[in-house]
Amino acid sequence: MVVEVVAATSWERAIVWLPALVIVTGRVLGVMILLGRAFAATVRESGHPRLILGGLVAVFGAVVLLTWLGIELPRE
């Protein structure tokens, strides 16, 4: 069976893998929505939501800037 899938043309392979792709995409989106809603509730209930969001923006900006500059963290 594996050999047949590998030997199939690209559109046949896409048809075989399409259901798995749809299921995995749905599960990933579901988890992201669940985590996003939980994070939003946590930020709303915190005493300093601006501080939390400002910190996230600062961290994201630092990552983008360091990536753009080409700086890499040391690896062990």
Image: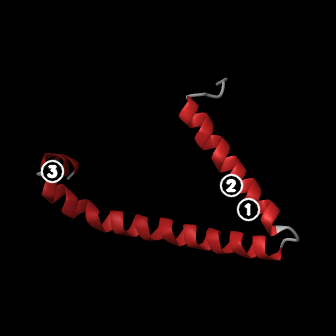
Relative to 17, residue 69 above or below = above
Cα–Cα gap, marks 1 and 2: 6 Å
Foreground residue, 68 or 17? 68
In this figure, which residue is indicated by the disc labeled 1? 53
In the picture provided, is 28 more to the left or to the right than 74? left
Residue shown at 34%/64% (left/top)?
20
In the picture provided, is 2 more to the left or to the right than 61? left
In this figure, which residue is indicated by the disc labeled 2? 57
Q: Secondary structure at mark 2?
A: helix
Crowding at dot 1, Cα within 10 Å, few <14 / some 14-19 / many 20+, comes out as few
Relative to 53, residue 76 above or below = above
Residue shown at 30%/68% (left/top)?
19
Q: Residue type at mark 1: give it.
A: Leu
Q: Residue type at mark 3: give it.
A: Glu
Labels 3 and 2 touching (C-beta < 8 A): no
Cα–Cα gap, marks 3 and 2: 49 Å
Q: Residue type at mark 2: give it.
A: Val
Crowding at dot 2, Cα within 10 Å, few <14 / some 14-19 / many 20+, comes out as few
Using the rendered view, name the quadrant where residue 23 is placed.
bottom left
Q: Secondary structure at mark 1?
A: helix
Q: Position of residue 30 (x, y in %)?
A: 52, 72
Q: Earlier in the sequence, mark 1 or mark 3?
A: 3
Q: How many marks?
A: 3
Q: Position of residue 76 (x, y in %)?
A: 67, 23
Labels 1 and 2 touching (C-beta < 8 A): yes
In the picture provided, is 8 more to the left or to the right than 31? left
Q: Position of residue 62 (x, y in %)?
A: 67, 42
Camera-side mark, 3 or 2? 2
Give me the disc on residue 4: 3
Residue shown at 84%/71% (left/top)?
46
Q: Earlier in the sequence, mark 3 or mark 2?
A: 3
Q: Position of residue 37 (x, y in %)?
A: 65, 75
